[in-house]
Image: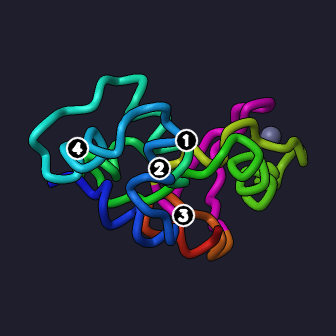
Amino acid sequence: MFRIQQCRQDMGMSQQELADLLGVTRQSISLYEKEEREPKLEVWIKLAKYLNVDVAYLQGVSDVKKSPTLDELEMLQGERDLYCPYCGTEQMNPWELPTDEGETECDYCGREFHYECEVEVVYSSMKLEEVL
Ligand SMILES: [Zn+2]
């Protein structure tokens, strides 16, 4: 179920305003919203841009309204610093660890150590939204 109408209304936009932004007719927007016509990929991308959500969310495929941008991901990564207790080397990919707590191998010295990440460490999209 498309969320075009819902997202447009959330933005306080009329069908005409959205149509003007996209360079399509108001009738096209109406048809998209009623799912009587499927937007082309490039239209989906524009819709997502102007409605400030992910394409998959608009399409009703995903419940993640907006994925973090690269900048935001880097910010998250910064919160996930993880250091080897033996050699002190910062680990390259702490955000790829599957759980908040467990055993991992040091990138540098190869020794296994137990890690426990801070609560800011996030893996699911739901938690991502909480942090952002
Ligand atoms: Zn180490």
Q: Is residue 123 left or right of residue 4?
A: right
The amino acid beneath tag 2 is Leu
Judging by the rendered image, the residue that carries numbered circle 2 is 18
Looking at the rendering, in which quadrant would you find the N terminus?
bottom left
Picture quadrant of residue 36: top left
Q: Secondary structure at mark 4?
A: helix
Asked whether the beta carbons under mark 1 and mark 2 sit within 8 Å of each other, the answer is: yes
**Mark 1 and mark 3: Cα distance apart in space:** 30 Å
Q: Secondary structure at mark 1?
A: helix
Rendered residue at 63%/44% (across/down): 112
The amino acid beneath tag 4 is Tyr
Front position in the image: 48 or 36: 36
What x and y, as percent, mark residue 69? 66, 46
What stretch of residues is rendered in magenta? 99-117
Judging by the rendered image, the residue that carries numbered circle 4 is 32
Front position in the image: 70 or 52: 52
Picture quadrant of residue 96: top right
Judging by the rendered image, the residue that carries numbered circle 3 is 128
The amino acid beneath tag 3 is Leu
Q: Secondary structure at mark 3?
A: helix
Question: Can you tell which of label 1 and label 3 is closer to the viewer?
Answer: 1
Q: Neighbour class for label 2 at 10 Å: few (<14), some, many (≥20)?
A: many
Number of callouts:
4
Looking at the rendering, the quadrant in which ligand 1 lies is top right
N-terminal-most mark, 1 or 3: 1
Front position in the image: 131 or 84: 131
Q: How is the image coloured?
A: rainbow
N-terminal-most mark, 3 or 2: 2
Judging by the rendered image, the residue that carries numbered circle 1 is 21
